């Protein structure tokens, strides 16, 4: 058990975009994280399904978010995350931290981190730990 | 013992984790003749079919063993299918990639990263011919997990059979073709609800006439369940969706005594064995009652609730992955005790990769062992008459009725989906389930109890998708586009588009013509989208 006795830190006042890039229709992970972030005080924007990386980067900038979470379970994470990071860079928004959730094999987790992803959260990680990690990214 | 301490930390302390199941039904410590029971469950093969749809259970016919598989190019998937058939599998189950499911050609920019990833890429008839090369479609039944583009894949399958000289009436198999749950949980919707429902009615009415042995719909609760909802919600929402299809077919002039015989269902089996058995027993009873009482269906065959299942899904976890084999064998027993007509057993490596050949074979062996060694299939509904099972079945029926009433009171399943009410319910349940796992209230071995430090180590074999898949798929698509008769493509697509705005036309013959002309899935969908528009997803947290 990893659940800590301490309450997770507050994300009050933080704006976070949760997005589904690509064609993957499994949105429960994205929604569960969105609900957990909201419970922790964050202002959460959820894109809905099937968004292009360019669209996601545009929303992140227009909505002036503090972080972007991408959820991908289709195995296309390497391509889609890379594209999203590039689109953010094109808009001069490479300083917005990006985290990723979904079915991400261990090898790919390090590849994604090397590309600039700040956190990778798979489904076994307790929500409190995810919140604590996101709070740390934003501090 | 560190493991024991871990269990204690999970709140277990060598005790039963909970006195009730996730559907909220309290279990008695001991069930006796005095345990509340509302009715006699009758006999298998007789209304309301609580104990099964066949009087002789699996004695007459063993369930169909159907492993969901498909990846990369049609050639690679064809090799995996031959491997599985060679090892005793009795039906095929085709997994399609996301571009095919969402109606995009591989050449679409949104499609490129997803080509061949979660299933096989199947953009036109020439690819389907390769997929089934050397497989006799008049002998093997094939199931397609396809929804948004189900009518097109069904048309392509018929065109493929036509090319091979196989009479349509000999085709057996299933298309999932259940768009309502796609809006709720699986997400491969394309068109708005009304034209999607029309397309589904077209396939069912056409199938009744032309492919009478083919199941043109498999109304699925599985994906809502795997996304997070409870067993009772899974059954209730699925039956509510089923009624919406019945109503649509009646509106289109279908005869319920006839089309209801082709309606089949599909569910997940997770780990609570008795809850699952009760879910299936209650589901059969509720469906038969609804058809008889609400629609005056008299033919027993049209009252029968036939279903397939998948064992595994989100009940499987990545840590200590070999434990998943044990989970799947328990779930298979639940499916058999619940009277399933077909079973797909997930491979242990599914939580983190496309199954290797080794894992796929082990998954098939798991259900073969249950079928042929355990003796479980000898007697129909062997749990029937158990005080506990009958009590749970009655309670499950009560829960299902109450949940279906909740959907009705909201304004029906279509309104509940268009408003995002059902989606919101599933997401909230998923959040709840995750919190229960995090707190240890819902024990998962290797995740919140009995963990070990080195458990993240991946098992020996790793599946590698050929990185050349995309390139080969795109090259073949180019070749097809050059070789086909362009005027025939345009002509058949024009006719399809003209027909789709006329509600009284059945679109199946038009789609079959398009497939014969080697029009692509993306081209057909683009024409329909031009007239029908796209579904607007309600985003509601």
Image (cartoon, rainbow, N blue to C red):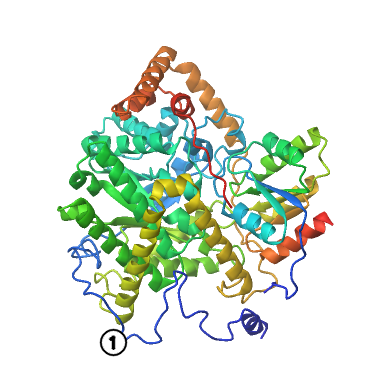
Decide if residue B141 is in sight here. no
Which of B369 and B60 lies nearest the eye of the viewer?
A: B60
Q: Is residue B13 above or below residue A42?
A: below
Residue B221's place in the image compared with A55, above or below, is: below
Query: Going 22% across and 64% down the picture, which residue do you hit?
Result: B49
Quarter of the figure that contains the C terminus of chain A:
bottom right
Residue B317, by quadrant, is: bottom right
Identify the residue shown where x is 61% and y is 40%: A22
* Residue A134 image position (x, y, % from top left): 76, 57
List the single residue furthest toward the top: B487
Within-10-Å neighbours for mark 1: few <14, some 14–19, many 20+: few
Numbered disc 1: secondary structure: loop
Q: Residue at x 37, y 22 (%)?
A: B496
Would you say B541 lies left or right of B524 here?
Answer: right
Q: Is residue B385 left or right of residue B351?
A: left
Give the camera-side residue of A43 and B528. A43
Quadrant including the N terminus of chain A: bottom right
Residue B101: x and y in percent read: 48, 38
Can residue A67 be seen by looking at this rendering?
A: yes
Q: Position of residue B455 (x, y in %)?
A: 66, 68
Viewer-side residue, A84 vs A67: A67
Tell me the quarter of the picture where residue B12 sits.
Answer: bottom right
Left or right: where B333 falls relative to B5:
left
Residue B509 place in picture, x, y as percent: 30, 26
The extreme left residue here reads: B298
Q: Which chain does the numbered disc 1 sit on?
A: B
Q: Which residue is mark 1?
A: B34
How many marks the image carries: the answer is 1
Of residues B80 and B439, which is closer to you in this image?
B439
């Amino acid at each position: 058990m990893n659940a800590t006795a301490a309450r997770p830190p507050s994300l009050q006042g933080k704006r976070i975009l949760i997005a589904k890039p690509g064609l993957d229709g499994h949105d429960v992970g994205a929604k569960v994280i969105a609900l957990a972030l909201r419970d922790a005080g964050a202002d959460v924007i959820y894109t809905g399904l099937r968004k292009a990386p360019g669209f996601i980067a545009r929303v992140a900038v227009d909505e002036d978010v503090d972080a972007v979470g991408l959820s991908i379970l289709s195995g296309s994470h390497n391509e889609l995350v890379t594209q999203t990071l590039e689109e953010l860079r094109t808009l001069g928004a490479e300083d917005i931290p990006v985290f990723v959730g979904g079915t991400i094999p261990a090898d790919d987790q390090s590849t994604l981190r090397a590309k600039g992803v700040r956190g990778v959260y798979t489904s076994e990680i307790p929500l409190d730990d995810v919140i604590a990690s996101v709070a740390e990214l934003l501090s | 013992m560190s493991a024991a301490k871990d269990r204690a930390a999970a709140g277990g302390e060598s005790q039963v984790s909970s006195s009730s199941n996730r559907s909220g039904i309290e279990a008695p410590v001991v069930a006796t003749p005095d345990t509340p029971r509302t009715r006699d469950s009758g006999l298998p093969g007789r209304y309301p079919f609580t104990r099964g749809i066949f009087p002789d259970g699996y004695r007459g016919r063993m369930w169909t063993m159907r492993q969901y598989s498909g990846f990369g190019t049609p050639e690679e998937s064809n090799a995996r299918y031959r491997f599985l058939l060679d090892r005793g599998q009795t039906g095929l189950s085709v997994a399609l990639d996301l571009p095919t499911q969402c109606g995009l050609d591989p050449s679409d920019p949104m499609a490129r990263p997803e080509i061949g990833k979660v299933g096989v890429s199947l953009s036109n008839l020439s690819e389907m011919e390769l997929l089934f090369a050397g497989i006799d479609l008049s002998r093997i039944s094939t199931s397609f997990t396809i929804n948004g583009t189900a009518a097109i894949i069904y048309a392509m399958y018929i065109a493929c059979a036509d090319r091979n000289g196989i009479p349509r009436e000999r085709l057996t198999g299933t298309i999932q073709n259940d768009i309502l749950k796609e809006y709720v949980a699986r997400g491969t919707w394309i068109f708005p609800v009304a034209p999607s429902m029309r397309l589904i009615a077209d396939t069912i009415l056409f199938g009744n006439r032309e492919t009478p042995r083919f199941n043109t719909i498999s109304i699925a609760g599985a994906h809502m369940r795997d996304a997070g909802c409870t067993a009772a919600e899974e059954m209730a929402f699925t039956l509510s969706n089923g009624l919406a299809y019945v109503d649509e077919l009646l509106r289109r002039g279908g005869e319920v005594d006839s089309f209801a015989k082709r309606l089949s269902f599909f569910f997940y089996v997770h780990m609570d064995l008795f809850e699952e058995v009760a879910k299936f027993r209650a589901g059969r009873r509720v469906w038969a009652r609804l058809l008889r009482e609400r629609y005056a269906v008299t033919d027993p065959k049209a009252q029968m609730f036939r279903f397939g299942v998948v064992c595994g899904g989100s009940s499987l976890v990545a840590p200590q992955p070999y434990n998943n084999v044990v989970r799947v064998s328990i779930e298979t027993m639940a499916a058999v005790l619940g009277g399933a007509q077909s079973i797909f057993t997930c491979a242990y490596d599914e939580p983190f990769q496309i199954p290797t050949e080794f894992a796929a074979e082990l998954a098939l062996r798991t259900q073969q062992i249950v079928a042929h060694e355990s003796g479980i299939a000898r007697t129909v509904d062997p749990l029937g008459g158990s005080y506990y099972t009958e009590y749970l079945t009655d309670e499950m029926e009560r829960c299902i009725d109450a949940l279906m009433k909740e959907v009705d009171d909201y304004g029906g399943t279509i309104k509940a989906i268009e408003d995002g009410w059902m989606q919101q319910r599933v997401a909230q349940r998923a959040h709840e389930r995750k919190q229960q796992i995090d707190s240890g209230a819902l024990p998962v071995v290797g995740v919140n109890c009995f963990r070990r430090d080195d458990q993240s180590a991946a098992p020996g074999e790793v599946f590698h998708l050929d990185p050349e898949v995309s390139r080969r798929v795109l090259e073949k698509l180019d070749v097809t586009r050059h070789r086909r008769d362009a005027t025939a493509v345009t002509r058949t697509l024009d006719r399809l588009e003209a027909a789709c705005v006329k509600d009284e036309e059945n679109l199946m013959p038009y789609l079959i013509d398009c497939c014969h002309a080697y029009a692509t899935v993306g081209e057909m969908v683009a024409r329909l989208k031009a007239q029908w528009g796209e579904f607007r997803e309600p985003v509601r947290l």
